[in-house]
Image (cartoon, rainbow, N blue to C red):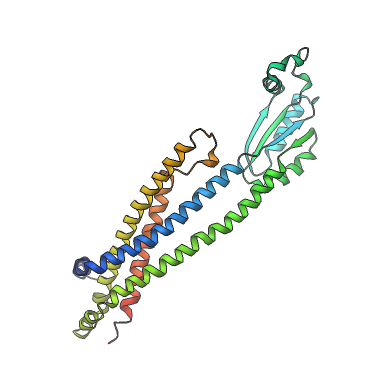
């Protein structure tokens, strides 16, 4: 395609926007509304997933060694445990640290430990897993390792997290798929309607010998502009609205030191949200225009 032709196509695409201002604003508004609805559901899912991830990091496995293990045996056991897959965090708790923790927990009653030292306490390990579903398998392996006295983990809490996580994954697909399908349908049909309004113009251009490219591509450029404008406005509305909600909720729960109740910062999701908006807006705008013009090219 010649450079002159490309310039003509882009020029006509831009001029079409100004020639049909009412339809342009109507299409842009529909694109904006559809993307805002989609964005709300996507942000909801992002925050639910973030909460689940924070919740899954809370349960910890406490492994207590036999109290009479030598330093070499403890080191061998630690090396064996660290080789297990899926470990997010591994913390060594020495006898001294365990003794200090016991004194701290007893508070005013710490005098019950008078006459004792840390030697009667076992070395222990605190383990957190990447995936809560892998905790039970890890525990089964750890319980039969030589030198392990006892393994403690909050089974009921983990069962709840695993079950909830599975349902959230299913819900995520549904909550994103439905508004995405809605947005695609509404946006495509609105842009098709805008093109249909000018079918006479397309027919006349076809009769006077204009090529398909010269007829079709200005409409495609117009559709892309509609998609871009709608995506940009939707991003500003969604981002501003989300920031207000996030600040309000954060101030309300500022005293709660728990990541589960905190919303994801807008800066962490805005690049992803903008990319999705732009891809959908441009893609649907171009596709809607191309499909609509095609059926009027045969005269």
Determine whether 289 is above or below 48 in the image. below
Relative horizontal placement of residue 27, taking residue 242 as reference (left or right): left
The answer to which quarter of the image holds residue 229 is: bottom left
The answer to which quarter of the image holds residue 265 is: top left
Q: What residue appears at the point 29 percent right and 70 percent down from the top-left corner?
A: 220
Query: Which residue is most to the top?
Result: 115
The answer to which quarter of the image holds residue 16 is: bottom left
Q: Can you give x and y, in whole percent of width and height, for residue 117 in the image? A: 75, 16
Determine whether 280 is above or below 142 in the image. below
Q: Can you give x and y, in whole percent of width and height, for residue 79 in the image? A: 70, 34
Q: What residue appears at the point 21 percent right and 65 percent down from the top-left corner?
A: 14
Q: What residue appears at the point 41 percent right and 70 percent down from the top-left corner?
A: 185
Determine whether 123 is above or below 214 in the image. above
Relative horizontal placement of residue 149, taking residue 225 as reference (left or right): right
Q: What residue appears at the point 72 percent right and 29 percent down from the top-left corner?
A: 124
Quadrant into which the N terminus falls: bottom left
Q: Can you give x and y, in whole percent of width and height, for residue 297 in the image? A: 29, 82
How many marks overall? 0
Front residue of 26 and 140? 26
Quadrant into which the C terminus falls: bottom left
Q: Can you give x and y, in whole percent of width and height, for residue 160 in the image? A: 66, 48
């Amino acid at each position: 395609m010649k450079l002159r032709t490309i310039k003509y196509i882009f020029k006509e695409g831009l001029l079409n926007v100004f020639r049909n201002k009412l339809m342009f604003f109507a299409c842009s508004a529909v694109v904006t509304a559809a993307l805002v609805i989609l964005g709300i559901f996507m942000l909801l899912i992002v925050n639910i997933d973030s909460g689940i991830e924070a919740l899954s990091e809370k349960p910890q496995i406490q492994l207590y060694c036999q109290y009479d293990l030598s330093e070499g045996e403890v080191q061998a056991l630690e090396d064996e445990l660290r080789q297990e897959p899926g470990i997010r965090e591994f913390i060594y708790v020495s006898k001294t640290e365990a003794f200090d923790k016991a004194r701290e927990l007893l508070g005013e009653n710490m005098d019950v430990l008078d006459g004792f030292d840390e030697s009667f306490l076992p070395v222990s390990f605190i383990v957190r897993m990447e995936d809560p579903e892998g905790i039970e398998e890890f525990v089964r392996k750890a319980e039969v390792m030589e030198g392990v006295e006892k393994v403690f983990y909050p089974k009921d809490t983990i069962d709840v997290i695993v079950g909830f996580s599975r349902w959230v994954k299913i819900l995520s697909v549904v909550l994103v798929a439905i508004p995405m399908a809605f947005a695609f349908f509404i946006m495509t049909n609105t842009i098709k309607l805008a093109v249909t309004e000018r079918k006479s113009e397309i027919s006349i251009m076809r009769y006077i010998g204009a090529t398909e490219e010269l007829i079709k591509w200005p409409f495609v450029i117009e559709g892309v502009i509609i998609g871009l404008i709608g995506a940009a406005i939707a991003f500003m509305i969604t981002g501003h609205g989300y920031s207000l909600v996030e600040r309000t909720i954060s101030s309300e729960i500022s005293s709660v030191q728990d990541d589960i109740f905190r919303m994801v910062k807008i800066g962490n999701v805005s690049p992803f949200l903008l990319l999705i908006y732009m891809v959908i807006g441009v893609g649907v705008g171009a596709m809607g225009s191309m499909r609509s013009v095609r059926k009027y090219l045969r005269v």
